Amino acid sequence: MTLFQRTIRELHQMLVDREISSVELTESVLGQIAAVGEKTKAYLVVTRDLALRQAKAADERLRAKRDVKPLTGIPIALKDVLCVQDVVSTAGSKILKGFSPPYSATVVERLEAEGAVFLGKTNCDEFAMGSSNENSGYWPVHNPWALDRVPGGSSGGSAAAVASGEAIGGLGSDTGGSIRQPAALTGIVGFKPTYGRVSRYGLIAFASSLDQIGPMTRDVADSAVLLQAIAGHDPRDSTSSTRPVPDYLATLRNGVKGKRLGVPKEYFVAGMEPAVEQAVRDAIRLLEQQGASIEEVSLPHSDVALPAYYVIAPAEASSNLARYDGVRYGYQAEGAKNLIEEYMLTRQQGFGPEVKRRIVLGTYALSSGYYDAYYLQAQKVRTLIIEDFKAAFQKVDALLGATSPTVAFPLGAKTQDPVAMYLNDIITIPANLGNVCGISVPCGLADGLPIGLQVIAPGFREEVALQVAYAFEAASDFRKLQSPLMRSAA
């Protein structure tokens, strides 16, 4: 087994035992990026020099046995919505082309403090808007399981990097499923923490009341390791929670015996592929065999989550993206005759079609005379969804369902039909509106493509989601699955 095929925990032990150095490990991963990067297009920027400098620094820490942490010397990929000081950060958009932030996101600083190694910025849908990673302002990402398929969006770059061996772990952001859905479509583990568990300081915003940063890894225990490193209060983010962060690894093996797990009947939606439904129902039976009790529950307002999301998220996006005018930073159009024309040309040329579509939609929903009819109504629906989750978690410890109703679809198959594209997030969006946490873990294959099981736990009960996901992973063999790109390059 090559180094880039191993997990964070395996590599941590090898680094501590001095079987390998961080420089060797980093060069192994950089070699895989060189070998398959043109196929996946997972990265927008590879920070090779920075990675090797950080790897050498990590080796010094390891040699001195000084402040060695679980991520010391581990190569990590960062979604391009996370600011890294003096490293070009574009959120996948041409309007931020060439922008090097003067500061780093809190999650980046926390990984630096652990001694992690940054491989580069991964490709994403422009400003994290998309379900297929075809809306990047630069190029689409290809799924390592089948290069003519999408990897899911918008964290498809980080997902493809982890699934192909181009990173040992990665960070993504999840506004409506953008960690969990690409994780499911590429056969890795993706975790959306509760809103407030992880600081959003330094995250280039899409929809501020929904965005959340989370880990993307090969297995559940690695997800716990990464979450442990980035979770916790940050005084620079007023929305981050002051609640104590549990020891996620310590409780990981608690199992599901005696746990009550709910299956929302609304999550088996029309149009779900039969193979996906079968794999998820098989996974639920396996958890029952591990000692969990399974019962059907109802989340009655799930059917209106999607329309509510596509009012709230574009409304917030239209406000957040107003700052990109060509004056402050990033792209600036040439040839304008006056300031107003400069604004218009910059935004016309800098933003892609999907971002423009959502800005128009959000501006309309917030405009005078329509605010009450659309935005306020959507917020009332959001309250109903929050109440649905509260009622369900009075009866059960966690909820189970599919992460995506389909496996990865062909590139270009849905680009001309935005509504069909939006439906890909239909099962993940309620967790963002309801402010609960959710994890996707591989649970099967259909036609050689991965399927994801979603475990949803109450807000700030990340340890419960991890325990259920870990119990399933330990009882099945799906953790051993590797994408063809990973296998062939090994």
Image (cartoon, grey):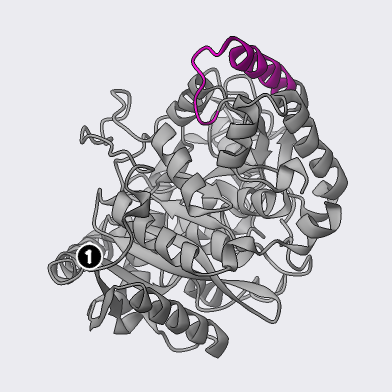
Splitting the image into 4 quarters, where does residue 240 fall? top left
Q: Is residue 332 visible?
A: no
- Which residue is tagged 1? 397
Q: With respect to residue 254, does 381 lie above or below?
A: below
Q: Position of residue 261 (x, y in %)?
A: 27, 72
Q: With respect to residue 352, does 281 lie above or below?
A: below
Residue sitting nearer the eye, 96 or 283: 283
Residue sitting nearer the eye, 254 or 280: 254
User: Which amino acid type corresponds to the residue marked 1 in the rendered image?
Assistant: Asp
Q: Which residues are magenta?
A: 50-71
Splitting the image into 4 quarters, where does residue 120 fall? top right
Mark 1 Cα-neighbour bin, 10 Å: few <14, some 14–19, many ≥20: many
Residue sitting nearer the eye, 408 or 129: 408
Q: Secondary structure at mark 1?
A: loop
User: How many tags in the picture?
Assistant: 1
Splitting the image into 4 quarters, where does residue 183 fall? bottom right
Q: Main secondary structure of the magenta part?
A: helix
Picture residue at 48% right of the left edge, 75% below the top: 423
Instruction: Confirm whether the magenta stretch covers residue 68.
Output: yes
Instruction: Confirm whether the magenta stretch covers residue 488.
Output: no
Q: Position of residue 390 (x, y in %)?
A: 15, 64
